[in-house]
Amino acid sequence: MQETPKLWTRPFIFLLLGNLFTFMSFQMLLPNLPPYIESIGGSKMEIGLVTTMFSIAAILIRPFIGHILMTRERKLLVLAGSVSLLGMTLLYPITQIVIVLLMLRFAHGLAWGWSTTTNGTAAVDIVPRKRVGEGMGYFGLSITIGMIIAPSLGIFLYQHYTFNLLIWISAALGIVAILLFSFTSFHTPDNVKENQEAPPKFSFAGSLIEKRSWYPALVTFFTTFGYGSIVTYIVIFGTERGLSGTYLFYLFNALFATISRPVTGRYFDKKGPWNLIKVCTLLAFIAMWVLAFAETNMHLIISGALFGLGYGSMMPAFQAWVISKTTTARSGIANGMFYSSIDLGIGLSAVVLGVIYQFVETASLFKISSFLFLLVFILTWLDARKQTEPWEPVS
């Protein structure tokens, strides 16, 4: 009987924790920037541009870092991204001019695109390929917890203290991430070392898109487009409804995503992504409608729990699906495309919903966005119908 490769190694644990603190540092700011922009005189369109400028920058940088990852060792690239994120975070308190803040968001997007691509690729290098679903599920859990717990903490700090205190705590978390990465032992694949002798020619389009993985990346895009309404408008929605516990949505989102992760990761490795994602899309759809009609904190808790089971389980499954369809040599490019699909989905969502927001109430944005999850269900179902062979774990 073949021995199961070890997953929980010291490098994997340190990388997972470092990525957790990276996402916590960043995600504390994300839901609070729209109301902050509003407080310093930003228009509704400029609120959407805060997210869009960031997403455009992250997408533009990823083909370059994806290409660099084909020839360079991981540690220096991971540390460079983390230090850049810390520097961008510390610059936020120095300006209250909207146009300058938009420029800062663009620079922050460059650092974010660099960091997420290198961190995700470093995880792929460490995780055994036969356990990619489970391993990237746990790595994705560090992302999910960062994306959910940190915003709830950030919302609490922004609503009860000051924006500057929010920045300083975010920076402290970024420093912890840098320290963890400093003590992490990274693995560089043999084909990357071979590429150092004869570096492949750079192509922006070739480094932007991994052809083998385009379909799961497209499905990821529509998923995050649906999620974009929550990122941009949930704090404003909570204020309109007089809900004091907006952070509870994120908190229970994280809790139920964490509870489900061991099960969903193993299911992916055994059965593949299709049935898992279809169930998750329906849970996310229901969660959006519960949120849209929320009148009490209990409604936020129910919505957050359902969304954690749905969206929180989908994202690592999408990443594992993207990685499972490509080679180790191009895993950096595939990872970059995966994260770009996330940023593009959230960024375009902010623009489109920013226009719609001028004509409808905030709750309607959640209702409209919910139908993106039904589209994801259909796309996943169509791909499942094309499968002629049983799912096999990646070797």
Image (cartoon, rainbow, N blue to C red):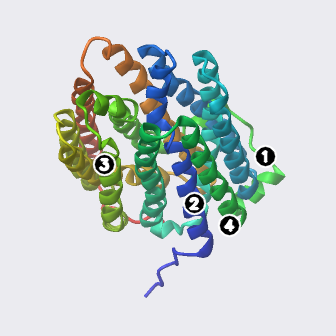
Amino acid identity at mark 2: Ala
For marks 2 and 1, the one nearer the N-term is 2
**Residue beneath the point at 23% across and 31% down:** 371
The residue that disc 4 covers is 184
Q: Which mark is residue 123?
A: 2
Amino acid identity at mark 3: Leu
**Residue beneath the point at 56% across and 55% down:** 21
Q: Which mark is residue 248?
A: 3
For marks 4 and 2, the one nearer the N-term is 2
For marks 1 and 3, the one nearer the N-term is 1
Classify 82 as above or below 18: above
**Mark 3 near mark 2, Cβ–Cβ under 8 Å?**
no
Image quadrant of residue 35? top left
**Residue beneath the point at 48% across and 40% down:** 161
**Mark 4 near mark 2, Cβ–Cβ under 8 Å?**
no
* Mark whose residue sits in front, 1 or 4: 4
Q: Which mark is residue 386?
A: none
Q: Secondary structure at mark 4?
A: loop
